[in-house]
Amino acid sequence: MKKLLSLILIITVIFILTGCEKPGGIEICARFLNHIKAGEYEAAYDMLSASSRNDTGEPLSNKISKDEFIGKYKAIFDELQITGVSYEIFAFKEGEIITTADYTMTYFSGKAGPMTDEYRMSAIRESGSWRIEWTPSYIFPQMEWGDTVRVAKTQAKRGEILAEGIPLAANVNAVSVIAKPSKIEDEDFVVRQVAVLLNMTEQAVKKKLDSAYNDFTIIKKTYPDGIDSFTEQQLLLIPGIGIDKSNFGLLRDYPEGSLLSHILGYTGFASEEDLNYIKDRWLDAQGMYSADSIIGKSGLEYRFERELRGTDGSFTYIAAPDGSVKRTLYTQEVQDGLDIELTVDIELQRRAEELLRLTLFDDITAGAVIVMDPLTGRVDAMCSYPSYDLNLFTRGISEEDYQKLLAQKNKPLFNRLTQGLYPPGSLFKPFTAAAALESGAITPDYVFSEPIVDDYWIPSKYGHWQWSAIKRAEIKHREMPLNLHSAILHSDNIYFANAALLTGAGDFTEFVKAAGLGEAVPFELSVSRSQLLNESSQMNLMLLADSGYGQGEVLITPLQMASSFCAFANGGNIPVPFIVKAVYRTEGTEYTAEYETQPQNWKEGVIRKRTIDVLEPMMKDVVDPKFNGTGNKLRVGSCKIAGKTGTAQIGNDRNREIAWFAGYRTGVDDEDARLVLVMLEVPAGEEYNDFKFDIARKLLKMDKQQQTEGD
């Protein structure tokens, strides 16, 4: 019966709309709804009655201007992502002066889905024509004059970065100084007092008070340690001022300060450049960021911004003039960011950073350390020295402090681990030896027998030598003859320059490129690309000879050098280094892995097993105190180490050098496998020679029990 009545009424309406010369009230109602349905808001406004319209240009109660009318519909429809409107008039009553129409209207919302309500519309006759007696209830039945549609945001909790369950990048509740202007009697007095206590300008405090909504404003947000107890007490004595410690958002905090600073990175407010990048490239993140958004600026905070960020919740509602909620239109649940668990051994990381800090000094030294599992590529510790306190940046570093950091000669903001490109020096020689052995250029017993005068050699078997002589380091008690064993033991430049020349540019280049030289090793953070030659250079005999002992134009990052050296401990395979163990989502009390990093090799079969079997015993002798090797001061003691030292010049500067050491445990169970790489930028001089051993020794011999005992 109800369907039949609706059908009769609709037919009647159609008859009225088509059969009358002058439109009646119900036709005007239908025309108005059709304009709204078509998005023709200006045409709809033109149908409003004089009692609804405001054409004065001044605000009037219970009246609406054309701009307000159009703006209100557009804003609400845009917020709810209304893509279509339908309506059905199911009853009406037409009189001489007033016509009423009862109808259902459905908004098709991209957020909330279909939104259907029942409405009643009135049209009145003015000067012989029917006009719409508009009220906000024609948008939603619950709306009245003075009501607004608002959106409240629920901030997503940024995911944390942890290692062994210990937060390294965490969230803390903001401490908010709040104000209720209605409780303030002497505003000038309050402004002056608050400005002094919070180290703000009076203008800034006044602006906050003037922006109060519903008798509430936040004057300042800060960290839990940002307001001392005395200041807190003084603020609470001021009428209208309060302090909240839990309800107004989270702030980023780095509990360990400078620990892992170059890897973790920091957060800050989104810049215009950040927002433009997001707009151009993160299409699914549109609307998530504004100038008030906190965003990862560097390190893992930047690299995993999308995982850590989460999605803010929103609450779209009809608000009464007093701010109370009259109807909830749409709720989007907040999705907190994902947590990132690192592979880092916290105690080992602390020890590595402490060793660098205690060993190096002033701004004339710098360095990097990597501790990793050579079988899997798992990073157990990595640090670039000097480091910096991440909290300085996330809390807002002053220009003065920032300039001080930039002025330091040893560049604390520079990530030497992944961005620094350095000549590997003698650390490269085992790879030259492997290339020569596998190409057949030399045998394990090959002896260099050409004339060497005062540790200088001029090649004579490769045509006319037009370059300077090749020099090796002076060694007391040099082991003879000059074969592969003694060359590795004493790190003989001449032997390895000759080995590279014997191998030839083609085979040598093919070997080192197969080992990744010329590429950037994959990692969670961006890594600088290594090189054999400068882009503008062509290989010649001198560059080939120099490359053989890790100089020439060879450049590599400490991270890639460490990964490459893993090949000797990993059956000739170079693993992909990784520091992210897993990414987790919290669901109630459950902690679910979104994904876990699976160890994999970057380059396979780089060095043959028989070649490793030749070279590894020689690298053991390098650090064995029974031999006069360049690494005999390492003296780990608790296990056998195979290792290699390296020294390289920084350009043409003979006053500074790069000091390298890389070594790994041998003869241990897989779970105890460990490789340590140390790279130091130090002045040239004997007093700095042992620094690399002082650092590597502690890291190579430390096991879990020794760490607990404080070794």
Image (cartoon, helix red, strand yellow):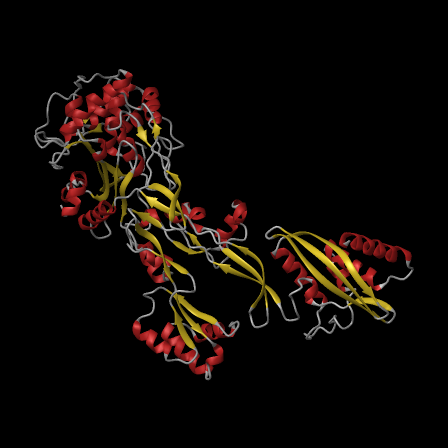
Q: Quadrant of residue 634?
A: top left
Q: Position of residue 69 (x, y in %)?
A: 70, 65
Q: Position of residue 249 (x, y in %)?
A: 42, 61
- Does residue 99 appear anywhere in the picture? yes
Picture residue at 74% right of the left edge, 70% below the top: 52
Q: Residue furthest bottom?
A: 186
Instruction: Between residue 471 and residue 28, name the one nearer to us.
Output: 28
Q: How many marks?
A: 0
Instruction: Between residue 536 and residue 156, name the one nearer to us.
Output: 156
Picture residue at 48% right of the left edge, 78% below the top: 181
Picture residue at 20% right of the left edge, 21% below the top: 613
Question: Would residue 315 be found to the left or right of residue 89 on screen?
Answer: left
Instruction: Between residue 255 and residue 549, name the one nearer to us.
Output: 255
Instruction: Between residue 687 and residue 557, name the one nearer to us.
Output: 557
The answer to whether residue 307 is above or below residue 374 is below
Q: Position of residue 670 (x, y in %)?
A: 23, 31
- Work out which quarter of the rendered image holds the C terminus and state it: top left
Question: Would residue 668 be found to the left or right of residue 33 on screen?
Answer: left
